[in-house]
Amino acid sequence: MDSKRVYARQGPESKLCLYWQAGHCNRYPCPFLHSNSEVLAAPSSSSKGGPRHHHNMVWRNPSSSSGGNQLKSKWEGKDRHREKNPSSSSGGKGNQDGHVENLVWRNPSSSSGGKGNQDGHGENLVSRNPSSSSGSGGKGNQDGHGENTEEKLIGGVISNSQGVKPCKYFLSGTCYYGDRCRYLHSWCMGDSFSLLTPLKGHQKVISAITLPSGSDKLYSASKDGTVKVWDCHTGKCVTTVSMGREVGCMISEGPWLFVGIPDSIKVWNAQTGAEMSLSGFTGQVYALEAANDMLFAGTQDGRILVWKYNATANSFEPAASLLGHCLAVISLTVGGSKLYSGSMDHTIKVWDLTTLECVETLSEHTDVVTSLLCWDQFLVSCSLDNTIKVWYTGNKDRLEVAYTHHEQHGVILLGGMHDSRGKPVLLCSLNENSVRLYDLPSFNERGRIFAMKEVRKMQTGPGGIFFTGDGSGEIKVWQWST
């Protein structure tokens, strides 16, 4: 006879052990039946002998000084995430899992400080108690979304050591809990800015966003090998240009648009329609910068190539090849009379724009220098070494570190702008799929932006508008509140 039908007829206390049935139950003694014949003979819940199996079994924390009842955190039913529901704290009926009903999860933050225990079937019986104020040194455990974190509950929203935690299922559009989810259901935190609209169309990582001065068109480039042109009034893509190769970077300067692809830089003049191609190198172009009628390109082989604009011929002519980095140059910026380059060799080099010679090498970072930004008289750099460094010109006109800001994740991109009140704000993209916004010079946090994947490009626009592009190929348009 089918054991499920017997169970349905005779009650939960006669439940057959599904793990024994599958041939891998290793619990002894097991509170569930290990025989089909026992299922047939098991008394019902209404029999005088009482239930043979305890369907209200409670697993207690043996190391807790209290009785363990106050450490309970019930789990209300299976969700579509296939994980435990961290948000449920109601006193409804317990979940019916494969073995135990109304299972009470052991509190991992009890004074024992030990790791969560596994039951006889290899299932982790530890569930985070979000309301626990215990200060134990126990390790964080799996939350309701399958992540290992040390968390607490702040204002009804899950928070960990990094701040309020967004729901990754909300970010992917698949959260089943909806308003009942204790993880943040928002693309940002902060009351000074808001999301206007997403721009969808690219299929891979956004590698560049640029808004030419005076233009009503936004240009975006991606590793999917395309450049898209967006109408700033409608938010619609009006043109898609296939580059045939993965786009590494793109900038605009005046009427010119420069697109870096492997072994070449494509150049367009938006006013005249002129097209040209700059070559003479091998590998991807990771960074472009324009200043003093010159175009600088940071390349995969560690060189910085320079082209000079010839107004008479309306073209760009090779001017120099700057040598010094031993690995790829992935960031460039110009400030005053200097060009600054950041490389995978962990160094920043300072180049004189007049002589095109290296005048200084900065070696304070211990990992890849991912982005550079000139802000007033300061140079701001970031790295995968989890730091943001602020540099100033000290003794003997040499750059010195004025301040080092530490993050818990690698920093991959910097951006700067002013908010609606004219206050300077630094945007820092971290490799844990978020952007931090800091007031300058205090580095007080103003808010956060969340994304499904790393935010690889940011671009500022007029009227307090700014753009972010992430690894999923999506661009988002943001605006500072007035």
Image (cartoon, rainbow, N blue to C red):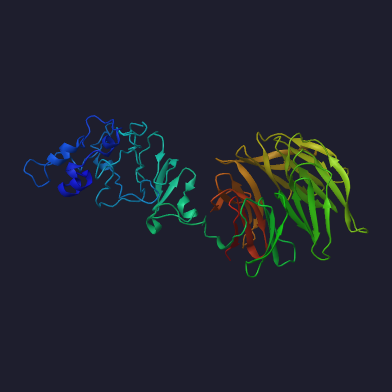
Locate residue 482: give its quadrant. Answer: bottom right
Name of the residue lying farthest toward the bottom: 233
Residue 6 at least partly seen: yes
Whether residue 260 sits left or right of residue 319 in the image: it is left
Q: Residue 141 location in percent, x, y? A: 40, 38
Q: Residue 208 location in percent, x, y? A: 68, 53
Q: Residue at x 65, y 60 (%)?
A: 422
Asked whether 427 or 117 is in front, the reply is 117
Locate residue 143: give its quadrant. Answer: top left
Q: Residue 84 location in percent, x, y? A: 36, 46
Name of the residue lying farthest toward the right: 312
Q: Residue at x 31, y 34 (%)?
A: 121
Asked whether 78 or 320 is in front, the reply is 78
Quadrant, the N terminus: top left
Q: Residue at x 52, y 60 (%)?
A: 191
Residue 442 at least partly seen: no
Whether residue 451 sits left or right of residue 36 in the image: it is right
Whether residue 174 sits left or right of residue 263 in the image: it is left
Whether residue 82 sits left or right of residue 441 in the image: it is left
Q: Residue 204 location in percent, x, y? A: 62, 51
Name of the residue lying farthest toward the left: 48
Locate residue 119: give its quadrant. Answer: top left
